[in-house]
Image (spheres, grey):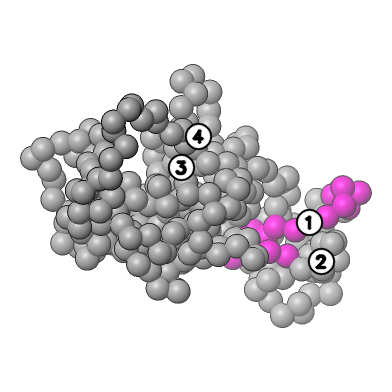
Amino acid sequence: IVKYKNQDLISFITSHSHDCNIAEKYDIDKKGREISRKHQLEAITIKKSNLEDIQKDPDVRSVEFDYKVHILPAMHSYDVEAGEGEPRLLEDTPYGIDLVNPAPRLAQGNNKISVCVVDTGYDNNHEDLPHLNSVDGFSSYPGQYWSHDGHGHGSHCAGTIGAIGGNEKGVTSVNPDPGKFSFFIGKGLTDNGWGTGSGVLAAVQKCVDKGAKIISMSLGGGDYSSMANDQYSGHYEDDGVLIIAAAGNSGNSAYSYPASYSSIMSV
């Protein structure tokens, strides 16, 4: 991941007008992948032998290795006792709903806001999820579409946030009325449940660009990154966006990122 001193040096944004463009010169495909123009971040794939030259380039502020990110927490199925496998006729209320919003429940507000889920995608054909338009999502990975969730984790997380309530299907959610909020989906992880730090950051930036005020990320991986910390801090302090990330279920005091950045709410 390259952080430039000037956002106009990002090759994805410009028309390749710089003779000394880093991506054109060193990337194996001769082009970079935009992460955030505002924060001057671009992902490139290089040979290790070129790393020192890039670090010394006068247009480069800093360079970090990209890192793997994965879903959190791991999803496990529950054992079903004999006799409990009959079809459900009415929607269920997951136990977590009563924990975060016990009766008498706090009603949804009247100010419609955009909530972004950065994960493995969104099953746009799911009967219990709001149907989204083609402009309501973004994928960081070519050939993988935000409206397809090959893993299921992203749709599961979106369902906790906004599964349709009162339709006698599936489950209800924290926000059961789809008319009082909207989704934007950032496919920051691939269909196999893994992704890159740059892919997550690009998805987060797109969520902010599209007006999301809350971003949910049930994912983690990698060590502390000054580039990621700067971007997340900017979204919180300058853009007024609340980002919530999973701390994981490991049950220890170890720092997990991105949840442990000071500008992110860890859950």
Pointer 3 residue: 218
> Of the residues shown, which amino acid type is indicated by label 4?
Ala
Q: Position of residue 20 (x, y in %)?
A: 83, 69
Q: Is residue 118 left or right of residue 189?
A: left
In what element is the residue under mark 1? Answer: loop
- Residue at 21% x, 62% y: name it: 180
- Residue at 8% x, 40% y: name it: 104
User: Is residue 42 found inside the magenta-colored segment of the image?
Assistant: yes
Q: Earlier in the sequence, mark 2 or mark 3?
A: 2
Q: Give residue 59's quadrant in the image.
A: bottom right
Residue 212 visible in the picture:
no
> Of the residues shown, which amino acid type is indicated by label 1?
Thr
Q: Which mark is residue 29?
A: 2
Give how far apart the Cα atoms at labels 1 and 3 are. Answer: 26 Å
Q: Position of residue 152 (x, y in %)?
A: 48, 49
Q: Position of residue 142 (x, y in %)?
A: 65, 65
- Residue at 53% x, 28% y: name it: 255
Q: Quadrant of the C terminus?
A: top left
Q: Position of residue 124 (x, y in %)?
A: 42, 64
Pointer 4 residue: 74
Q: Earlier in the sequence, mark 1 or mark 3?
A: 1
Circle 2 packing at 10 Å, graded few (<14), some (14-19), many (20+), is few
